[in-house]
Each structure stands twice: as C-alpha cells, then as structure tokens.
Amino acid sequence: MDEKTETRERILEAAGRRFEHYGYNKTTMSEIAADLKMSTGNLYRFYPSKLDIAEAFARAHECEEDTMMEQVVSSGGSAGERLREFHRVVLEHTFNMIDHSKKIFELAQAISRERPAYSNRRLAAERVYLERILRDGIAEGLFAPNDNLNELAEMIQCATMKFRYPQLYNCYRIDMLRRELEGTMDLLFKGLLKR
C-alpha cells in the first residue's frame, strides 16, 4: 500500500471515530486533522470537504453490504424466499447499524441530502441483485415474464423504500418494521406471481 492510500485510510479511521462519537454535524475538519497530528491544510489535500470524507467512509462499508446481498441472492431456495430474505436482511442490517450508533444516522442523512448521486448509485447496484432474483423467479415459473427487469426492480425498490432508509423509519421498533415488511412483500408477490 502506498503512503497516500495509507494516509487516506488513517483519515477515514479518525473521521469514523469522530462521526460515531460526536456525530457528523459536530465534527470539524480541524478536529480530524488534530486527531491525526496533521495540519488542516494537509487534510484538505486528501479530502476537499468533510462531506467527501463522509462519502468515502460510507463507500468503505459498501463491501460489507454487497457481500451480504450477494450471499442472499446466491443462497439456495426459491426466488420468492430469496426476495423476502433480501429485504429482511437489508432492513435488519440497516436497523442494527443505526441502533448501534445513532450518530451514523446523521451521516446517512447528510450524504442522502447533499450527495443524491451516491444514493442513486447504491440503488442501481442493489437493482442488479434484485434483477437476478426476478430472473430466477421467472425461470422457475414463479413470477410472470417481464421484458424490463430493471424497471420492475426499481418499482420493488419504490414499494420497499421505507425499509431501506432509516430517515423513513427511525421512530419505529424493529418488530413493527418486520410486520410491515412482511405485509408489503405479500402485496408485491400478488403482483409478481405468474397467473
């Protein structure tokens, strides 16, 4: 690993500690720099803004999410079971992450508000997994054929948006969210099933 990459990782670790302890809004670039015993000017050479650090911090956690989604999609079972499990796992993962650290919720809000392209890119990546499940369901004869799986995956995302973004459910208990997700999935299945 080269020195520049190593420094970027050190910055993300220091910023992550601050974000988790003090929150995104109360963390400053100068505090991150002081934690690293570097000048604020030097910190700006690596990341032009605190929001750039926050986005890089979020990107560093994408691998964990992608691995989790890939495991569900590649697991055994019918496409219907995997579609339900996919949404359950996404809900549980996000809920537990936010429940573990309320300050991460602040970071998620800032990124979704200030960097919608980041959120759109993550949704597009998730649609790839959903398309695979849908394609399998059609091949199994479970789901009705569809010529535009990307659009169908997008509509499923719209219907399940509440369970993906803590901004939409932060006042609910996990048992309530599980019940609502199950009901939503029941409705979706009625529309997806081959007649």
Image: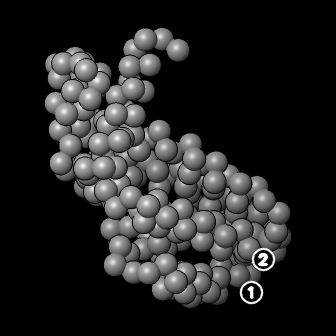
Residue drawn 35% across the image and 55% down it: 104
Residue 191 in view, yes or no: no
Contact flag, marks 1 and 2 (Cβ < 8 Å): no
Residue drawn 38% across the image and 75% down it: 169
14 relative to 176 in the view: left or right:
left
Q: Which residue is mark 2?
A: 142
Residues at marks 1 and 2, CA–CA distance in whole angstroms? 9 Å
Residue situated in front as seen by the camera: 18 or 1: 18
**Amino acid type, residue under disc 1 in the picture:** Arg
x, y percent for residue 45? 24, 18
- Nearer the N terminus, badge 1 or badge 2? 2
Q: Helix or strand or loop: what does disc 1 sit on?
A: loop
x, y percent for residue 57? 39, 40
x, y percent for residue 8? 38, 24
Q: Mark 1: few, some, or many residues within 10 Å (few <14, many ≥20)? A: few
x, y percent for residue 154? 50, 64
Residue drawn 48% across the image and 11% down it: 2
Q: Which residue is mark 1?
A: 195
12 relative to 183 in the view: left or right:
left
Residue situated in front as seen by the camera: 171 or 115: 171
